[in-house]
Image (tube, helix red, strand yellow):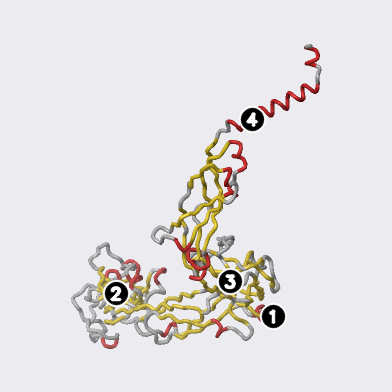
């Protein structure tokens, strides 16, 4: 009997079917329920045109544009229920202006019989509403790379030249300009191409605006670009000054300052090859004080040449003319050197304490010079006879100051005698000197042995004073 039961295939099949049926009966009699969450239910927007579009507005959901519900259903039905069984809507006519929130309405549209109950988790969502704006931007050409050396652009053409952009106010405020990037690396000929118009948020065209926002619209998305490439030459600016030695009395021309010192020009290759500088001329005769002159570069270029794009169109030259000052230096007689003296005569400087030397020049130069930088000399070679002479000394300055100043100096009285004789001390030339019948000069009571030419160590004969 046992063997019949274990070896009976039909009985085995029947037993399996019976077990399945029995399990189904048990489940149907006692089927438990589960509570679970359905997420990702998309939100459908109602009355978008009336509330938003017709009023020149736009909207955006800051958070995810979906909602969730909590569902209770039999365990066996759980897998059959999904987000597609629900519909979530928001009515843009019902936005609460203070917070920008709007109520979410959810309905069950499928498998209503399988859902025992459900609870709405998301009851409202925030909607950002703002104005739409339309602005026009000039399309800029943004060269990428560098032209071949000594070449530049002489003209840039874009068609169309402007683009009309429509975007939310918050997006529009970020736009700096519209442009097309064009690769010009190594170009020596004209460049022509069609490019995509992009919007940039910075002046340097380093950051593009994200154009994936469907609310951003351009009336045109492409433009044709034509760049004219021409030969260039960097030429120097030559400033020619005349009358610098005839500026107003009491003034001195110092130098000029020129900006820019070079200019980039374009034009025919043959013309550029033969043109190497711009020459401007200025006559400073009679001018007192600094002056600044502006010269329009194009006025100094030959026909066929012009200033390159992006270069300054004028030259500014400032001519420095300073007022002269005077300073007087008192040189004691013991510091005055005599030269060219005859061995048969004796020489001495009169009773005057010394001589005043006046220098005229720039204040900063006058402040640096001292008595030790100047040498007062008397050349006696032309005075061959005894007498009293009013002599004009020579003043030499130290080498570093020789070309800085205009020098004026007073006269010095020099008394010339023969050894053991006394001269007439009245000023004049030898023929005016008083002599005896024997030819000897009258005594003056002063020693004839005081001959300058030896510098004393005393500083009492050195002083300076400022001239008014």
Query: Would you name the residue on which mark 1 appears?
Result: 270
Q: What separation in Å lies between label 3 and label 1 (alpha carbons)?
A: 32 Å
Residue 263 shows up from this direction: yes
Tell whether 445 sits left or right of 169. Answer: left
Q: What number is the disc on residue 140?
A: 3
Quarter of the image for residue 9 reads: top right
For discs 2 and 4, the disc positioned in front in the rendered view? 4
Q: Is residue 342 visible?
A: no
The structure residue drawn at horizontal position 56% and vertical position 65%, both measured from the top left corner, is 216
CB-based contact (under 8 Å), mark 1 and mark 4: no
Badge nearest the viewer, 3 or 1: 3
* Residue in view at x 50 percent, y 82 percent: 295
Q: Which residue is mark 2?
A: 327
Of the residues under marks 4 and 3, which one precedes in the sequence? Answer: 4
**Structural distance between the alpha carbons of marks 4 and 3:** 78 Å
- C-alpha span from label 3 to label 2: 63 Å
Horizontal and vertical percent position of residue 312: 53, 76
Question: Is label 2 in a helix, a strand or a loop?
Answer: strand
Q: CA gap, disc 2 to disc 4?
A: 130 Å
Image location (x, y in percent) of residue 267: 65, 80
1 or 2: tag closer to the N-terminus: 1
Q: Are marks 3 and 2 in contact (CB under 8 Å)?
A: no
Q: Nearer the viewer, mark 3 or mark 2?
A: 3
Please give the name of the residue rendered at 57% of the width and 37% of the height, measured from the top-left corner: 74
The residue singled out by tag 4 in the image is 25
Near mark 3 (Cα within 10 A), the count class, few <14, some 14-19 or many ≥20, is some
């Amino acid at each position: 009997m046992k063997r019949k039961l274990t070896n009976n295939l039909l009985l085995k099949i029947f037993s399996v079917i019976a077990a399945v049926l029995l399990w189904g009966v048990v489940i149907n009699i006692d089927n438990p329920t589960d509570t679970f969450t359905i997420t990702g239910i998309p939100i459908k927007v109602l009355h978008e045109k009336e509330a938003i579009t017709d009023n020149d507005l736009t909207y955006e959901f800051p958070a995810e544009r979906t909602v969730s519900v909590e569902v209770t259903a039999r365990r066996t039905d759980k897998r059959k229920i999904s987000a597609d069984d629900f519909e979530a809507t928001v009515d843009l006519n019902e936005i609460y202006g203070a917070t920008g929130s709007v109520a979410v309405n959810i309905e069950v549209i499928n498998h209503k019989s399988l859902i025992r109950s459900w609870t709405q988790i998301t009851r409202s969502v925030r909607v950002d509403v703002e104005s739409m704006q339309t602005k026009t931007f000039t399309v800029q050409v943004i060269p990428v790379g560098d032209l071949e050396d000594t070449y530049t652009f002489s003209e840039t053409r874009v068609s169309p030249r402007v683009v009309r952009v429509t975007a939310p106010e918050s997006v529009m405020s970020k736009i700096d300009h519209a442009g097309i990037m064009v690769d010009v690396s190594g170009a020596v000929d004209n460049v022509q191409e069609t490019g995509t118009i992009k919007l940039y948020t910075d002046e340097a065209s380093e950051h593009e605006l994200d154009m994936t926002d469907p609310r951003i619209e351009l009336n045109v998305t492409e433009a044709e670009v034509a760049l004219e490439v021409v030969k260039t030459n960097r030429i120097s600016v030559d400033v020619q000054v005349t009358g610098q030695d005839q500026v107003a009395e009491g003034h001195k021309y110092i130098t000029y300052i020129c900006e820019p010192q070079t200019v980039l020009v374009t034009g025919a290759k043959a013309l550029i090859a033969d043109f190497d500088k711009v020459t401007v001329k200025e006559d400073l005769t009679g001018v007192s004080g600094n002056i600044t002159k502006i010269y329009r570069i194009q006025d100094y270029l030959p026909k066929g040449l012009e200033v390159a794009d992006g270069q300054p169109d004028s030259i500014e030259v400032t001519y420095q003319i300073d007022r002269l000052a005077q300073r007087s230096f008192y040189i004691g007689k013991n510091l005055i050197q005599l030269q060219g003296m005859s061995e048969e005569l004796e020489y001495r400087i009169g009773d005057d304490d010394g001589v005043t030397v006046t220098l005229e020049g720039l204040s900063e130069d006058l402040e640096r010079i001292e008595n030790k930088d100047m040498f007062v000399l008397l050349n006696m070679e032309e005075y061959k006879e005894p007498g009293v002479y009013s002599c004009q000394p020579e003043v030499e300055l130290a080498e570093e100051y020789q070309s800085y100043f205009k020098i004026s100096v007073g006269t010095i009285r020099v008394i010339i005698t023969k050894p053991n004789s006394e001269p007439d001390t009245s000023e004049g030339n030898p023929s005016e000197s008083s002599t005896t019948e024997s030819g000897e000069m009258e005594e003056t009571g002063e020693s004839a042995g005081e001959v300058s030419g030896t510098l004393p160590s005393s500083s009492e004969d050195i002083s300076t004073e400022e001239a008014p």
